[in-house]
Image: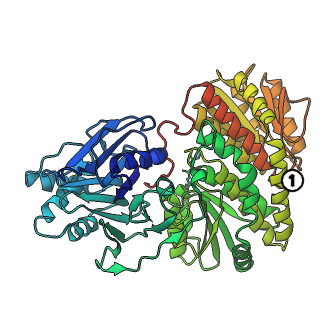
Amino acid sequence: MCGIFAVVNDPDHHAAQTTLDGLKKLEYRGYDSWGIAVVEHKNGTLAIEKHIGKIGGATTALPAGDIAIGHTRWATHGGVTDGNAHPHVDCSGRIVVIHNGIVENYQELKQMLLRRHHRFTSETDTEVIAHLIEDRVKSESVETAVLGVFKNLAGSNAIVVLDAKTNTIVACRNGSPLAAGVGKGQFFLASDVTPFLKFTRDVVFLADGEAVILTATKLRLLDIKTGKDKRLTPRRLDWKLEDAEKGGYPHFLLKEIMDQVTTVPKTALINRNEIAHVARRLERADRIVFTACGTASYCALAATYFFSGVGRETKSYGAYEYTPFSGFAGKKTVLFAISQSGETADTLIAARNAKARGAYVVAVVNARGSALERLADTTLPVGSGPEIAVVSTKAFTSQLATMYLVSRACTGNYARAVREVQDLGKTLRRWQTKKLRHDVLDLAKTLMNQEDIYIVGKHVSYPAALEVALKIKESSYIHAEPFAAGELKHGVLTLIQKGTPCIAIGANDETRLELLSSAAELRARGGTIIGITPFTSAEFDVTVKTPDAGPLTIIPNVIVGQLLGYYLGIGRGTDPDKPRNLAKSVTVK
Ligand code: M6R
């Protein structure tokens, strides 16, 4: 939620333009409004520009300068107005702040500042930070002032403070992501690495409780509590700039869907040793738990089916519902926390709770350097590269492949599972062609004006149904409701009328006949049945045939749902990369 960018020593002396370009890469984190502050080259004063709306096509007329900060907002406190857009400035015009998170004690801080006659120009929680620092810089260095103020903020926050007087940026992290890029004579800060990949791949991921100070000559890493310097060791990322570009596709979402022909098989080539290590841990475990949110939670659910296939009973919980059950975690618990970003607040809380009770935590993540990775005992990076579209696609299928490999490693079948995932990669490459896209587009045209779509699946195809429904909802805003096929008779059938679109998702497994019975029941009530399966059937009015990949058929089945969501969204005029009301990374509870 909210994207942060900063540059020091801009390569072209146009820090505002660099910041605008950087923010465009972060728009997926929030797109209610955006703003930039730059220290004017000519006279050293602050120039600020703020606007509501998406940053995509924006230009800036801000003056030349070498140092700037910028923000793209996902509103929490205060409506979507120019005034509430970040950056926020103090009364003197010296201190300017951008922020990702929620200052939970902002009301009491604001009352105290009002009594001291500070003038507020927004309704945000963020603005208190600028005024608090303003008071302290009268008698302290900006570094000491920012660290002092940050320690008194309640909640999960990342802040970036620009001091126009000393041309210094101070940034602090507690709970919201921040990465610093170390370029050739330039420094960058951002909520994730994609906006500065074009300048550098040398990155310092800040941990909670760390701060960085950026000046024209130096980047320092500090411990917020002690104020002492820490060793700064940038790590070189293997992500390429092209990974964060659209690569000729009209939207990131379509590009990332198509990327899966390479990202899925790539998953099988990484984590060999880590998976072997986790498998040994699982041998000793008496409780195996998966936890996650949203799309990742459907991977968690799918993992329970993968593990039941190798004779292990496991549990999956939405991370936001884990607290009542965290008390069951102990030293022999292995908890898998699955997350694309590794920064989802609820998932982090669940993992921390389990760890506090002695559980062994495995992070299954895509983005690197995240808070989840730091707290985990072992990390299994899924390696699908930057996922820019808010709607998660390629990270999900790589998470599925990873969890499949882990489950098979438990019974000594890891090598075979690796071959299965790699074979699936080859199959996807043959199948994910223009023809598939045209077929799904044609299907989308028939569903474009529907208000409700029902989706059923059984066993591992049930999490597929949940995920396909979420893709349709997020991308097109059509109400799509998933059910376990077996649930239909217990009430849901009342909703089916003549022409109601029903999607039946299935694999060539023991559920095939039961799925077809469910399809028949839906059809008998007038439903129009769309099969997403590796087989055809007279029960289906339309079939999108998927490759048969055994338990991994869930991957091509979900890919059809991803494409369907995408084309429905295009047809209904939504922005598939940035669905309304959503942010890519949900770093607040
Ligand atoms: O970064 P995470 O995987 O932890 O994010 C979890 C969910 O917020 C995320 O999957 C969300 O549901 C996406 N919008 C799904 O497309």
Q: In x, y percent, where is residue 420?
A: 85, 60
Residue drawn at 86 percent across, 45 percent down = 547
**Left or right: where 120 falls relative to 481:** left
Residue at figure coordinates x 65%, y 27% from the top left:
452
In the displayed structure, 411 sits above or below 157; it is below
The quarter of the image holding the C terminus is bottom left
Find residue 301 and report its image quarter.
Answer: bottom right
For this view, does 558 lie left or right of residue 41? right
At a point 48% along the width and 47% down the height, the residue shown is 25
Picture coordinates of residue 249 (x, y %)? 64, 38
Which secondary structure lies at badge 1? helix
Q: Residue at x 20, y 63 (%)?
A: 166
Q: Residue type at mark 1: give it.
A: Gly
> Residue 482 location in percent, x, y?
68, 39
Q: Residues within 10 Å of mark 1 (few under 14, many from 20)?
A: few
- Give the labeled residue for mark 1: 550
Q: Is residue 161 above or below residue 568?
A: below
- Residue 240 lies, with reference to residue 488, above or below; the image says below
